[in-house]
């Protein structure tokens, strides 16, 4: 698999999933894998301003900032706060078309207008989430949801075998 070249502008969802599979195949470190998945999604998705991970911290129950691409962000989210906390509580993907109308929204980048949060579920527990923000309203579709859930599933099935780095 060619990693250096990245994805061309013609890349399909299937290309992205294939690329993720290749990234995960070669590395067992969670931080490295989440960093590369963030970079890949940032490259592939158009009109987004932030993509990254928040990871469950057992001690506090908070979701703590993980690898991401975008502006510096809030470091801790305590469920049920935020779009992230709301998604974590239901253990379901949450698409918010207009974050300004979502009372629980935590604004990390004032430019964000819509958001999708996809939980990574291992042993019926949300261990992390993928979070993507866009400066456009209603940016995220059912296709985005399907693709991000497939990526979350790939990470979930490898979660235990991937080393914990913190
Ligand atoms: N908007 C999120 C917080 C994280 S940032 O978007 C990166 C929320 O409401 O949970």
Image (tube, helix red, strand yellow):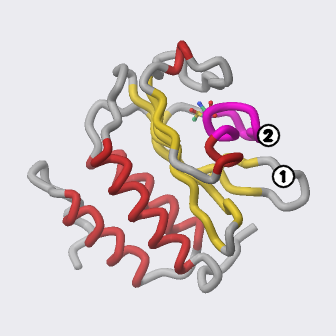
Q: Quadrant of the N terminus?
A: bottom left
Residue located at (48% from left, 63% from top): 152
On residue 78, the disc is: 2
Q: Label 1's element?
A: loop
- Compare marks 2 and 1 and give the one earlier in the sequence: 1
> Which segment did they paint magenta?
73-86
Label 2 to label 1: alpha-carbon separation: 7 Å
- Depth check, front residue: 82 or 22: 82
- Depth check, front residue: 87 or 115: 87
Residue located at (20% from left, 63% from top): 5
On residue 61, the disc is: 1
Find out whether residue 124 is within the magenta segment: no
As drawn, the residue found furthest toward the right would be 59
Q: Which quarter of the frame holds ligand 1?
A: top right
- Find out whether the residues at labels 2 and 1 contact each other: C-beta distance under 8 Å: yes
Q: Label 2's element?
A: loop
């Amino acid at each position: 698999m060619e990693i250096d070249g990245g994805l061309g502008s013609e890349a399909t969802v299937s290309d992205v999933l294939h690329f993720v599979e290749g990234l995960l195949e070669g590395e067992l470190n969670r931080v490295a894998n989440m960093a590369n998945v963030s970079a890949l999604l940032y490259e592939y998705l158009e009109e987004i301003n932030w993509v990254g991970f928040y990871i469950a911290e057992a001690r506090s129950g908070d979701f703590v900032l993980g690898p991401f691409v975008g502006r510096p962000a809030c470091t801790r989210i305590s469920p049920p706060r935020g779009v992230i906390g709301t998604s974590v509580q239901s253990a379901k993907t949450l698409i918010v078309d207009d974050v300004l109308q979502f009372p629980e929204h935590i604004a990390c980048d004032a430019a964000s207008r819509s958001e999708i949060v996809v939980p990574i579920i291992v042993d019926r527990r949300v261990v992390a989430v993928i979070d993507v923000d866009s400066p456009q309203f209603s940016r995220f579709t059912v296709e985005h949801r399907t693709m991000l859930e497939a990526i979350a599933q790939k990470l979930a099935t490898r979660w235990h075998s991937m080393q914990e780095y913190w």
